[in-house]
Amino acid sequence: MSYLLAFAPWIVYTVVPSSQWQWGALAALALTAVTLAWSFARRRPIDSLIIQLGSVLFFAAGTVLAFADPDTALHPYLPALANGWLAVISWFSLAIRRPFTLGIAKLDAPREAWRQPLFIRTNVIITLVWAIAFTLGGAMLAAARVADAGTVVVLVVQVVIFVLPMAFTVRYVAAVKRRVAQLRAQAGTAR
């Protein structure tokens, strides 16, 4: 649920038709503001809001650009720029040793797990997968634009760029939890 909340504005922005991009940017900005306000009201830790904080910057700039210059030459490249911005957020969070998924994971994990090396490593790996996906997505979307590949190709790439890392996240977390349970069971029988 926390990932969906973090990426909801990007999903909204993606599904709004390109011809209505100003309204898509404005809707994504409004949704980001609402999710941030809701998160602050619930006293969510700032490290769980890295994507939302980066999103508000992107959509604020995008909304201003969209209404100030609706025919900007940047418009066709916005899907690539959006993925590029998410890649920057992801890589930056790794560079400062605060993988964006770590703060999100802490919302559902017991406090005693937060400093566990496996918990941290798991989130570094998950954030790395997201960072790679966004980087590749930005490159593929820029290439699709240069090749004038069309709306369907752009939409498919955008969906895949979210679905694959989300599926990896769910499966990887489940695999780590299974492995931890196995190790605990083995440790219990060894006594």
Image: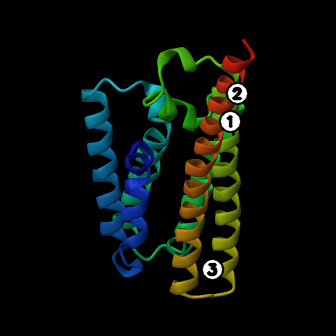
**Image: 17 above or below 125:** below
Q: Is residue 69 left or right of residue 47?
A: left
Rounded to the nearest whole Å, what is the CA distance between mark 3 and mark 1?
43 Å
Which quarter of the figure has residue 91? Answer: top right
Q: Amino acid at mark 1?
A: Arg
Q: Which mark is residue 179?
A: 1
Number of the front mark, 3 or 1: 1
Q: What whole-number distance in Å separates the C-alpha atoms at marks 1 and 2?
A: 6 Å
Q: Position of residue 153 (x, y in %)?
A: 58, 83
Secondary structure beneath label 1: helix
Q: Residue at x 58, y 59 (%)?
A: 83
The residue type indicated by label 3 comes to Arg
Mark 2 and mark 3: span between their CA atoms? 49 Å
Q: Is residue 97 visible?
A: no
Question: Mark 2 or mark 3: which is in front?
Answer: 2
Residue at x-position 28% and y-position 52%: 30
Q: Are marks 1 and 2 in contact (CB under 8 Å)?
A: yes
For residue 45, above or below residue 169: above
